[in-house]
Image (cartoon, rainbow, N blue to C red):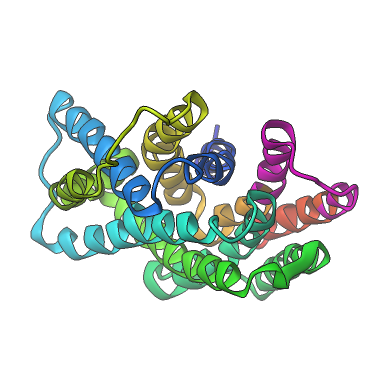
Amino acid sequence: MDRSTSGWINGLAGVVIFSGSLPATRVAVQAFDPVFLTVARAAIAGILGLALLLSFRQRWPGRQDLLSLLVVALGVVVGFPLLTALALQHITSAHSVVFIGLLPLSTAIFGVLRGGERPKPAFWVFSILGSALVAGFAIMQGLTASPVGDALMLAAIIVCGLGYAEGAKLSRTLGGWQVISWALVLSLPIMATLTIIYWPPSLSGIATPAWLSLAYVSVFSMLVGFVFWYRGLAQGGIAAVGQLQLLQPFFGLALASTLLREPVTPAMLLVTLAVVACVFGARKFGK
């Protein structure tokens, strides 16, 4: 299997794992404060990341890597989880996941700015078309349902795209799972302290689904998904493999419909087919 194909397979695995993040967050914020949810999931993932690094005796990152790791931490460890948790207090997960369709474009732009990639012009046609399809679908679902929620989701997309591109760039030398693990460890002292500060007064009324959702976003969304995702971006190219995120809204909508019984319109199928075509087009012209 060539490096590019392996990158797309790893990237798809990451996207499937990430697809459960927003539905799980939507469940969790019904029981947990958004700030507590953000710092707790980062603290749990940070402890797991530290255990992995120590178990496999990984070398310490160099001083030149610290700034990039800080950007990754601010983008995907703190920024995206916090902004989406706040947004999901105002909008449904079915509404929020369509914004993820803008994430590939954000990732591709930062891939050019930070990763030094230069995709062919045709790539941008497919990328913009795919993002436009998802954005159009969002408008059909009612984009102005909550201006606050929508603004928070857009901010989340920007910081996440930067975190993805910066992490993928660093993965080329440091390794995929090592990047997210070190970013989590870098954040751990602050996240652990804030977890204690924002600890709920009582845990007795929190139902099992909320605990399971916290476990999912801590283990899979914050750590396991990135093992595949950063490896995929580093192998197949940040801009190209990043287009797989166009499929994430539809995986997420399916989960929202199945698990949360949130309404999903039949138009999703037509848009999904068109988006898949854009993903294949972007792959062809991604390098």
Q: How many marks?
A: 0
Q: Quadrant of the N terminus?
A: top right
> Left or right: where does residue 229 sit relative to residue 188?
right
User: Residue 211's quadrant in the figure?
Assistant: top left
**Above/below status of 12 relative to 38:** above
Residue 193 position within the rendered picture, expressed as x and y whole percent measured from the top left? 14, 48
Residue at (62% x, 74% y) in the render: 147
- Residue 186 visible within the image: yes
Query: Split into 4 quadrants, where in the image is the C terminus?
Result: bottom right
User: Relative to 220, is 135 on the left or the right?
Assistant: right
What residue is at 86 percent from the left and 49 percent from the top? Answer: 265
Q: Position of residue 276 (x, y in %)?
A: 77, 50
Nearer to us in this view, 164 or 192: 192
Q: Residue at x 58, y 61 (%)?
A: 90
Task: Name the residue: 57% across, 38% down.
Answer: 20
Which stretch did the figure color magenta? 248-271
Front-most of 242 and 82?
Answer: 82
Is 136 displayed left or right of 225 in the figure?
right
Q: Where is residue 37 drawn, in percent x and y?
A: 37, 46
Q: Does 252 sit above or below residue 209?
A: below
Indicate whether residue 281 is drawn in magenta.
no
- Where's residue 278, x and y in %? 75, 58
Q: Residue 199 or 119: which is nearer the viewer?
A: 199
Q: Main secondary structure of the magenta part?
A: helix
Q: Answer whether residue 287 is visible to the viewer in this image.
A: no
Answer whether residue 250 is magenta in the image.
Answer: yes
